[in-house]
């Protein structure tokens, strides 16, 4: 049913939102001075890879992305079907935000981002694609140099930085929409949610957008 | 003043429609938009042409019968007004005014600017009422209603069913309408008793009628002549979730 699907969108979306917080926090390790960053990031990555609880959560994460994307496709197509003929003239910008009207498009950009991102790192580490991975002095996979080498490519850095914008836009509407989808209706709380959504989407957008630039300019593998 | 109407003409749901242009002189700025259309129709009658069909009843902004997509906005250029409350002073001399019918799969076109909104009636027919035995009016004070609850019920009950929320929604979602009807009764002790069945039945009917789902763009609350808040939809989602979780 219509609302059931939206509950799935909202719950998977919010789950992904929490994941993003964890993910960004870890990425801040990359901003430490080179040597420290290398050790901290490699150790962090090593701990994650060898923790069964994290493996279980990561499966949830993949499922959330898949469910969220598939539901998004179904909902967006159904919504389009509900208005088979568009208006000749429509000043939608006078009554609603662009983000809110283009969640599908923004989500698609994020999906492309996720695929490239996983090809860049996940496929190399988890699936073993590409050349043999470097090992650091502690015998752990030197994921830090993989990150830095990848992001020394200006196109990849630019891609990451630019796509952090649709991410922020998607999140700004997504968080507020999810709260209402799940039944939060008090105006006072919704005002707080709006503030949180603005703060959250800015931090995520700036964080994921600027870290690659920092690495491109300042880090050494 | 002189205006150029660009009006959607369509004989029936089965036939194709298209825009037709009409230049109309001698419009005064204090005419309402519907009066300007009356005037256009008079000139069409004199020329033996078919008049433009459009819906209205009270022309006082209270019945919800009127509804035209005027220059890219449901009910015209102002927020929270009905079509019948739009006046020609809102337009400029020589301006082109585009008039389109509400667009939604659930609202088949009857003729020109008139659409069939009976899908909304069918949603109300699914438990959008309370089950009481009819008869003499009961003693008014036998069921006490707090002022704040009565106010909230009235805020939702203000919905006049014009369909602007559906017309403006990119998904043609009937969520604002359905939520208003559900919440209106849920705020009152007489209605609350049947909220679970009601919210399930009305939401199911909304889906059967081919409306889209709600993306919370907020367009509906800007176009709603009664300023019904989008938080009504959040409240409906809340009631629906509760009804699902407590279903026996
Ligand atoms: C990290 C990734 C993502 C996060 C954190 C996220 C978060 C969210 C949240 C919280 C919502 C609000 C749910 C609601 O309206 O109740 C949402 C909605 C939506 N998301 Fe995502 N999302 C992500 C990725 C994606 C992807 C990859 C797609 C598409 C392929 C997508 C498409 C959509 C669409 C279409 C909606 C709106 C559905 C509607 O019209 O109501 N999202 N997202
Ligand atoms: S004709 Fe009654 S509200 Fe416009």
Image (cartoon, coloured by chain):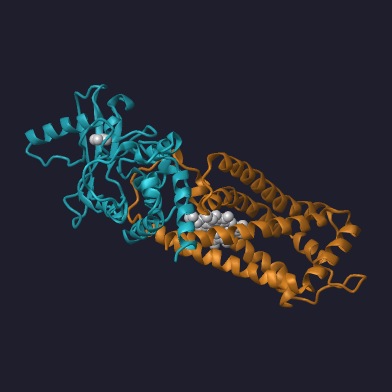
Chain colours: A orange, B cyan
Residue located at (21% from left, 33% from top): B58
Residue located at (55% from left, 50% from top): A179
Q: Position of residue A171 (x, y in %)?
A: 60, 51
Rendered-image quadrant of the C terminus of chain A: bottom right
> Does A30 sit left or right of A19 as displayed?
right
Q: Position of residue B31 (x, y in %)?
A: 23, 24
Asked whether the viewer can see residue A109, the reply is: no
Residue located at (72% from left, 50% from top): A207
Q: Quadrant of residue B48?
A: top left
Between residues A112 and B106, which one lies in front from this camera angle?
Answer: B106
Asked whether the viewer can see residue A126, the reply is: yes
Vertical side of B17 occupied by A113: above or below: below
Quadrant of the rendered image holding ligand 2: top left
Q: Position of residue B238 (x, y in %)?
A: 49, 53
Residue located at (75% from left, 53% from top): A211
Q: Name, please, the residue furthest toward the right.
A: A137
């Amino acid at each position: 049913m219509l609302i059931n699907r939206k509950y799935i969108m909202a719950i998977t979306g919010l789950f992904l939102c929490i994941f993003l917080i964890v993910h960004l926090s870890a990425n801040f390790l990359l901003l430490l001075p080179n040597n420290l960053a290398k050790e901290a990031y490699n150790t962090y990555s090593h701990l994650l890879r060898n923790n069964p609880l994290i493996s279980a959560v990561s499966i949830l994460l993949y499922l959330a992305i898949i469910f969220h994307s598939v539901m998004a496709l179904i909902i967006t197509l159904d919504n389009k079907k509900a208005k088979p003929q568009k208006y000749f003239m429509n000043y939608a910008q006078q009554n609603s935000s662009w983000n809110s009207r283009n969640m599908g498009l923004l989500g698609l950009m994020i999906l492309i981002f996720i695929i490239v991102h996983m090809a860049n790192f996940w496929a190399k580490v988890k699936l073993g694609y590409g050349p043999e991975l470097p090992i650091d002095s502690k015998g752990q996979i030197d994921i830090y140099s993989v990150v830095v080498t990848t992001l020394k490519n200006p196109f990849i850095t630019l891609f990451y930085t630019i796509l952090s914008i649709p991410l922020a836009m998607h999140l700004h509407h997504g968080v507020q929409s999810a709260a209402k989808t799940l039944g939060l209706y008090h105006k006072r709380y919704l005002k707080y949610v709006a503030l949180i959504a603005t703060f959250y989407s800015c931090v995520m957008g700036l964080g994921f957008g600027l870290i690659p630039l920092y690495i491109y300019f300042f880090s050494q593998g | 003043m002189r205006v150029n109407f660009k009006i959607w003409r369509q004989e029936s749901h089965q036939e194709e429609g298209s825009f037709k242009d009409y230049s109309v002189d001698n419009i005064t700025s204090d005419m309402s938009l519907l009066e300007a259309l009356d005037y256009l129709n008079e000139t069409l009658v004199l020329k033996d042409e078919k008049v433009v069909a459009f819906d209205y009843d009270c022309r006082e902004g209270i019945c919800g019968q009127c509804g035209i997509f005027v220059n890219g906005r449901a009910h015209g250029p102002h927020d929270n007004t009905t079509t019948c409350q739009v006046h020609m002073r809102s337009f400029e001399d020589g301006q082109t005014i585009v008039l389109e019918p509400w667009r939604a799969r659930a609202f088949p076109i009857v003729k020109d600017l008139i659409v069939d909104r009976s899908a909304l009636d069918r949603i109300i027919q699914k438990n959008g009422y309370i089950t009481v035995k009819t008869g003499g009016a009961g003693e008014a004070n036998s069921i006490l209603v707090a002022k704040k609850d009565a106010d909230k019920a009235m805020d939702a009950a203000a919905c006049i069913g014009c369909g602007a929320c559906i017309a403006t929604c990119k998904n043609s979602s009937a969520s604002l309408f359905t939520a208003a009807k559900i919440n209106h009764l849920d705020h009152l002790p007489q209605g609350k008793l049947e909220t679970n069945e009601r919210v399930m039945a009305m939401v199911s009917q909304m889906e059967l009628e081919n409306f889209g789902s709600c993306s919370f763009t907020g367009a509906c609350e800007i176009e709603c002549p009664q300023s019904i808040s989008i938080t009504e939809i959040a409240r409906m989602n809340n009631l629906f979730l509760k009804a699902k979780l407590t279903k026996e």
